[in-house]
Amino acid sequence: MILILDNFITPEECKRLIKYHQKHEQSSAVWPVGATDPCAHQLCSADIKMKLFHQILNRAQQKVHQYFDKEMMTDRADLIKHDIGATHNLHYDIQYSWTTLASVVYLNTLTSGHTVFEDGLKVSPRAGRMILFDGQKYKHGVEKVLDKKRFSLPIWYRYLR
């Protein structure tokens, strides 16, 4: 199941997260590792000292409990900025064998930079929208960002055991 939830976070929350990324971009990592321009810039959850960020992660976990499984918890999250021209090829989330679900919360609205799935589904980046899916089951990626920088909050989940 691929779940799309609009208005998961407010426009004001989106703006605050984008400003946080912009303020701390100098400490972000280029992603994927070794990429050259255009690329993405990633702030990892372990480095994010923002109360709102952690409140949103708790809300996301509640949605996972509501729609998927109460035995899952947030595993990792990042704040990511894709530069104009950046893409992310189709892939499965296999960074950690224990990662089960993935979500993306879009922080700004674009006419490009869609999240795409191998089956042809395209999800438009819309500020406040969240998509939830099994990243090890659904091959997915990011179409080329054309109109402006794309800000998002990807979150991964795992079982408590």
Image: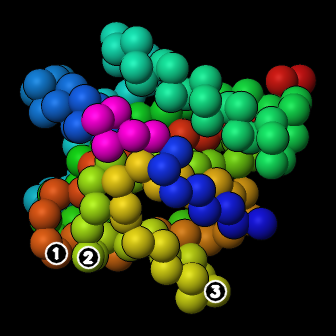
Looking at the image, do the residues carrying marks 2 and 3 touch, with CB atoms under 8 Å apart?
no
Residue at disc 2, secondary structure: loop
Mark 3, Cα crowd under 10 Å, few <14 / some 14-19 / many 20+, is few
Give the image location of residue 16, x and y in percent: 25, 30
Q: Residue at x 16, y 24 (%)?
A: 24
- Residue 155 seen in the current view: yes
Highlighted range, magenta: 9-13
- Residue kind at label 3, given as amino acid type: Asp
Image height check: is 148 above or below 30? Answer: below
Image height check: is 76 above or below 36? Answer: above
Q: Residue at x 61, y 30 (%)?
A: 59
Mark 1, Cα crowd under 10 Å, few <14 / some 14-19 / many 20+, is some
- Residue kind at label 2, given as amino acid type: Thr
Label 3 sits on residue: 119
Q: Is residue 99 left or right of residue 122?
A: right
Q: Is residue 129 magenta?
A: no
Looking at the image, is mark 2 or mark 3 nearer the viewer?
Answer: 2
Label 2 sits on residue: 111
Give the image location of residue 66, x and y in percent: 81, 41
Mark positioned earlier in the residue sequence (1 or 2): 2
Q: Residue at x 87, y 40 (%)?
A: 69
Q: Residue at x 35, y 54 (%)?
A: 127
Label 1 sits on residue: 146
User: Could you give the CA–CA distance between mark 2 and mark 3, rounded to whole angstroms?
Assistant: 20 Å
Q: Which corner quadrant of the image does residue 99 belong to?
A: top right
Mark positioned earlier in the residue sequence (2 or 3): 2
User: Could you give the CA–CA distance between mark 3 and mark 1, rounded to whole angstroms?
Assistant: 23 Å
Magenta stretch secondary structure, dominant: helix
Residue at disc 1, secondary structure: loop
Q: Which corner quadrant of the image does residue 131 belong to?
A: bottom right
- Residue kind at label 1, given as amino acid type: Leu
Query: Which one is nearer the viewer's eye here, 15 or 75?
Result: 15
